[in-house]
Amino acid sequence: MHSVSLLAAILASTSLVAGHGQVNRVTHGGTSNAGPNIYFAGAAANSKTATRVMYQASSPAFVLPGGFTDNKQMSCEGSANNPAPQSISVNAGDEIDIFWEGATGELKGKPGTGSLTAYNPWVHAMGFVFDYITSCNGDCSVFDATNAGWTKIAHAGIDMSNTISSDLRATMKGKPEQYYPTSGPGLWAMAKLVQDGSKWTVKIPSSLKSGQYMIRHELAAVHNPKRNGDASTGPQMYIACIQLDVKNGGDASLPAGTQAKSLYSPNGDFANISVLSGSFDPAKVAIPGPPVWDGVSSSSSNGSGKAAVTTLSKAAAPTKATTKAAAATKAAATTKASSPSPTTSTSGAAATSAKACRRRRGITKRAKRSHNEPLRRMVQNRLS
Ligand SMILES: *[C@@H]1O[C@H](CO)[C@@H](O)[C@H](O)[C@H]1NC(C)=O
Ligand SMILES: *[C@@H]1O[C@H](CO)[C@@H](O)[C@H](O)[C@H]1NC(C)=O
């Protein structure tokens, strides 16, 4: 009995470690704002970041269906060191690029990851990407997002007019986390993210009134379908909350939005999605969550909630006008005002490497008396 529970604990901790990752940095107009150091609250980077610490960021970093109805877990609250101290200054209508980093090096240097070698690529390739926004009602650095209403500004599922690269398909098979569909068309939004160098682009609606806002950028990984009675299974939601100071805005105020606890049902079609089965039909995948706000200045992203092809907006396909939607978006794009400097600008080379994680685990095991010095070194490595 004892050894069985010990084994279970070891297996659990192994999967937790394998599951984490975080925002490496957010870039905008040639500037870069590093994500928080999730291992050491006192790190210098943490006084300069605009990205909040995710719920249980250091492990497992995701929220499972059992947590879908928890407003705090689902909105980056309930973590130490929140909110973030800074906001990134952007103009309404601008784009920000969010770079994800895996906590483990499974995909490092592997084909299909967009030549990313500076740090670990994001490790999952099947899943949705959602972008929500809420007003901070003033200063984001003191905003409690627990009961915020979230407005969806973009979402993406599987683009059936596109295909995962053969390189990334082979890489995922070797991970091993085989990609479904195993052949033929179907590019999951998350595969696109990995192929693009673990990057996702979010466009701030140009109609939005000036003010401080928080982006709730969410990766929903679906590689471990829910099994009855196993609370560790189901879609894994990786939620990044990024604080923005939006300038030169339009006239639009956000609608009331949806509280984080009401975005997805813990027992709905999305929570139950089973992409690994032979009967899985990628063409029938509905995009979960509320519709995309019609105030997003694009005739395409109207949030019908179906067929990803028609809803892959500019956020999903910033450089490739592969769909009518993207083409329309491109045509509608106005000249971008030059971007002011963000309030912070730090080295984007932050690296929560597997090495750092191992080191940190080693530290935890050792006596706590020498706790700070190795952590400081780790932070320095991370920032160098
Ligand atoms: C999802 O699965 C649960 C059992 O785990 C079931 O009770 C529920 O009805 C399913 N939901 C849908 C929408 O099929
Ligand atoms: C939204 O999209 C759906 C199909 O994707 C379409 O039937 C509907 O007319 C669109 N609504 C608007 C207001 O554009």
Image (spheres, rainbow, N blue to C red):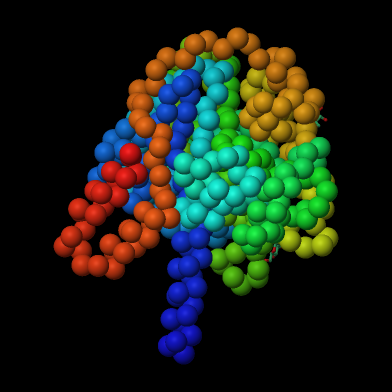
Q: Say above or below: 136 vs 206.
A: below
Q: In the picture provided, is 249 more to the left or to the right than 229?
A: left
Q: In the picture provided, is 260 more to the left or to the right than 42?
A: right
The quadrant in which the C terminus is found is: top left
Q: Say above or below: 128 vs 330.
A: below
Q: Tell me the residue at 26%/38% (across/down).
A: 44
Quadrant assignment, res 217? top right
Q: Single out the residue that lies furthest toward the left.
A: 369
Residue 40 in view, yes or no: no
Q: Tell me the residue at 55%/66% (across/down).
A: 232
Quadrant assignment, res 218? top right
Q: In the picture provided, is 83 more to the left or to the right than 273?
A: left
Q: Say above or below: 21 vs 243.
A: below
Which one is in front, 289 or 185?
A: 185
Q: Tell me the residue at 43%/47% (across/down).
A: 54
- Ligand 2's image quarter is top right
* Residue 137 percent coordinates (x, y): 41, 27
* Residue 12 percent coordinates (x, y): 48, 70
Which one is in front, 29 or 251?
A: 29
Q: Single out the residue that lies furthest toward the bottom.
A: 1
Q: Say above or below: 325 vs 249.
A: below
Q: Tell me the residue at 25%/45% (across/down).
A: 42
How many marks the image carries: the answer is 0
* Residue 315 percent coordinates (x, y): 63, 30
* Residue 15 percent coordinates (x, y): 51, 65
Residue 195 in view, yes or no: yes
